[in-house]
């Protein structure tokens, strides 16, 4: 049974903070998929990645909604309500090619 998300109104137009996961790029570590915070534009890595920076960003900031972001996939996820959201085309364009590990 799908629950409603009460945070849809907090979704903002953001500029991605980095070309890939901010923390992974700094640390030189890898990620599997990227998640973009729709509150502040933080780019983090998904829960299949070793460092799970998107989830860590949520725990640190309580920013509720992320977007599937490599490339923009058109869906969002609310960490608080644990529901998938349809962004209805309001996805965030990439600012440049996403760097990948070799
Ligand atoms: Zn929500
Ligand atoms: Zn990361
Ligand atoms: Zn954020």
Image (cartoon, helix red, strand yellow):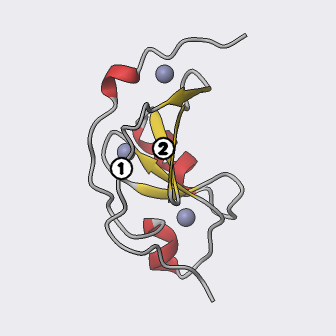
Quadrant where ligand 2 appears:
bottom right
The residue where tag 2 is placed is 67
Q: Is the residue 76 above or below the residue 56 in the image? A: above
Residue 92: give its label.
1
Q: Along the line of sight, which residue is nearer the eye, 65 or 98? A: 98
| Picture quadrant of residue 13 | top left
Q: Residues within 10 Å of mark 2 (few under 14, many from 20)?
A: many
Is residue 51 found left or right of 16 in the rendered image? right
Quarter of the image for the N terminus: give it.
top right
Answer yes or no: disc 2 within 8 Å of ligand 3. Answer: no
Residue 76: give its label.
none
Distance in Å between CA atoms under marks 2 and 1: 8 Å
User: Are dots 2 and 1 in contact, CB under 8 Å?
Assistant: yes
Q: Where does residue 48 sit, x and y in percent of width and height?
A: 72, 56
| Picture quadrant of residue 38 | top left
Q: Where does residue 9 sit, x and y in percent of width and height?
A: 32, 21
Q: Residues within 10 Å of mark 1 (few under 14, many from 20)?
A: many
Q: Secondary structure at mark 2?
A: strand
Quarter of the image for the C terminus: give it.
bottom right
Residue appearing at x 48%, y 66% in the figure: 21
Sooner in the amino-acid sequence: mark 2 or mark 1: 2
């Amino acid at each position: 049974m799908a629950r409603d998300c009460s945070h849809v109104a907090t979704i903002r137009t953001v500029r991605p903070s980095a070309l890939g996961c901010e923390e992974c790029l700094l640390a030189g570590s890898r990620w599997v998929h990227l998640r973009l915070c729709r509150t502040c534009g933080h780019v983090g890595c998904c829960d299949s990645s070793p460092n799970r920076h998107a989830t860590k960003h949520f725990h640190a900031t309580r920013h509720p909604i992320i977007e599937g972001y490599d490339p923009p996939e058109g869906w969002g996820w609310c960490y608080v309500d644990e529901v998938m959201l349809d962004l209805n085309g309001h996805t965030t364009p990439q600012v440049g090619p996403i760097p990948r590990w070799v």
